[in-house]
Image: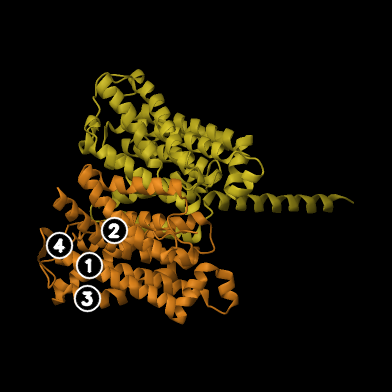
Amino acid sequence: MHEQLIQQLADGLLIGLVYSLVAIGLTLIWGVMNIVNFAHGDFLMLGMFASFWLFTLFGLDPIFSIPICFAGMFLMGMLIYRFVVRKVMKGPILAQVVVTFGVSIFISNLAVYFWTPDFRLLPPTILQGTWNIGGIDISIPKLAASLGSVVASACVLLFLKKTNTGKAILATEMDRDAALLMGINTDRINALSFGIGSALVGVAGAFLSTYYYIYPQVGGLFGLIAFCVVALGGFGSIEGAFIAGILVGLAQTLGGFFFNPSYKYAIVFSIYLITIWIKPKGLLGW
Amino acid sequence: MGIVVLLLLIAFPLFISQPIHIHVMILVFMFGMLGVAWNIIGGYAGLYSFGQVAFFGIGAYTSSVLSVNHGINPWLGLIAGGCAAAMVAAGIGYPCSNLRGHYFSIATIAFAEIVRIVFNNWKAVGAAEGLTLPMDNPSFSHFLFNSSKLPYYYIMLAFLLLALVVCYFVATSKMGYYFRAIKESHDVAEVLGVNVVLYRLIAVMISAFLCAMAGTFYAQYVLYIDPDSVMLLPFSVQIVLISMLGGAGSIMGPVLGAAILIPASEYTRMTLGARGTGIDMLIYGFLIMMISMYYPEGVWKLLSRIGAKKTRTSLHAEKTASAGVRP
């Protein structure tokens, strides 16, 4: 019983850290632009497929395709901002919400069209096997994914807090008009944060591809969870998203353990609803 | 104008009787009704719900479970489903009454997902296998017809009219002004003495009731329901999109949106015949992007603006004409 519980805790922590990374990308976009990106999960799917094809076609291990996923998704995010999101920034709020749904449906069905709706799985890569620590099984790909997520999240935080560009992003997040008056090109900042947000989720996708099923609709579930994580942590708060990601991961595995595994996502969503009922702006929102 | 359109719709099956076209029209009415229901909370009260499909599903499930397991007449099930949905809406709406903007939208998605997962695992209502409704006693009193789609056509048209009447009363009553005040600013409405929590609840409950009615209709029409056909998120998105395309916040807007979008998507699917390759959904996603980028105000606004311009120019012409006549 105890061992099983600790096993669940470990699994929850491992998946939770990946949720954190996915959610940090989302919260960055939200915080800077006030836009909820419903296509975020589909960007994750693109990252997974990119890593899958790089391995299948060129034999490039997912570990090495991470920089490519980062760069590719960065570009993709910038393009989507430039040609789609930017056009609705001044429009009604409803259009801003709905447009990313359109992007989501478009991207996931483009994937269905090119790669069929089949489920795919990468063969064992460099990251394989499990560690057994005192009776607890830790899968190496999952461990790598969560460690990678921590590193990536730390890099983002450092970038935001220490570089001038990062500070400009934070300034825009705090007060767009004031940032504009200070000579910050907020349009460029928008594009940049959309790019970084997408790039982060691309990295998460590359990591996930080492142990998760890869299929065009995979983004739906991850996207929904990322929303709960972001809203739980407080929109726009990076630290909040990081903590909430871990909480959601734990809630998912522990909920499945104590109740019924088929209800695990229902439990996650319920916890989210209860939290915002008590604290409407999330844990660290302001 | 409205009466002419209504007469045309009543007479439509006399001229075009292929079941497929009747089917598309029924879908237009159904989505029109869902759009009108969404419009009450989204268009007037400014609460962008992406969870209306849950109420649609609750309506479909309530009447179906009642008739399959307990032999209760679907017409009673229709009312029961509506009441159940309205009660659930109140139950979820009350704790959410402080949520604004995107927070509200995401809460509705989370809620709809919870409902779907629960129904997917709930053995008594068929879980993931769904429910098949029996085909006995086809008659109006049993809300069941097997020889023709026509009765469904007229029933759905009547439902749509009912929803429009409800929406009209909501929009033109004092309540409608309260809703719009809440839409403009939650805080200002509250300060001005509008009971925001109460009126948000009323809006959500009316909308849920109407969605559930459409759900019962769907169950009686298709005679098979499962969580994936009546409770999926894209369905909710489609409801929102229809309202937005037509024009959120106008009474007829959502119906217009349904009349444009549903035939477009149904006929592309039929001609491309490509379920599974994703082409129809690809076009659909592209359409959503285009609509939100270029027509976010909706077609109804566009039409009424053109109409307004025309009347203004004709008035102007009359004025100049009469001025010219005067000696």
x and y percentages locating residue A163 in the rendered image: 43, 81
The percent coordinates of residue A88 (x first, y second) are 49, 63
Question: Which residue has dot 1 on it?
Answer: A145
Q: Chain of mark 4?
A: A
Who is closer to the viewer here, A236 or B40?
A236
Please tell me in which quadrant of the rendered image residue A229 appears.
bottom left
Q: Is B41 in front, or is B27?
A: B41
> Chain A's colour?
orange
Residue beneath disc 3? A65
Q: Are marks 4 and 2 in contact (CB under 8 Å)?
A: no
Image: A176 above or below B317 = below
Determine which residue is flagged by label 4: A138
- Residue B23 is situated, as x and y percent measured from the top left of the image, at 34, 37
Task: Report the residue that reaches farthest toward the right.
Answer: B327
**Which mark sits nearer the N-terminus, 4 or 2?**
4
Q: CA distance from mark 3 to mark 1?
A: 13 Å
Q: Amino acid at mark 2?
A: Gly
Residue B266 visible to an observer of this rendering: no
Residue B244's place in the image compared with A142, above or below, is: above
Query: How many angstroms separate mark 4 from mark 2 (CA)?
Result: 25 Å
Q: How many marks?
A: 4
What residue is pinned by disc 2? A219
Q: Say whether mark 1 and mark 3 are on the same chain.
A: yes
- Indicate which disc, 1 or 4, sits on the residue closer to the N terminus: 4
Question: What chain does mark 2 sit on?
Answer: A
- The residues tagged by marks 3 and 4 sit, at their Cα atoms, a distance apart of 23 Å
The residue sitting at 79% across, 54% down in the picture is: B320
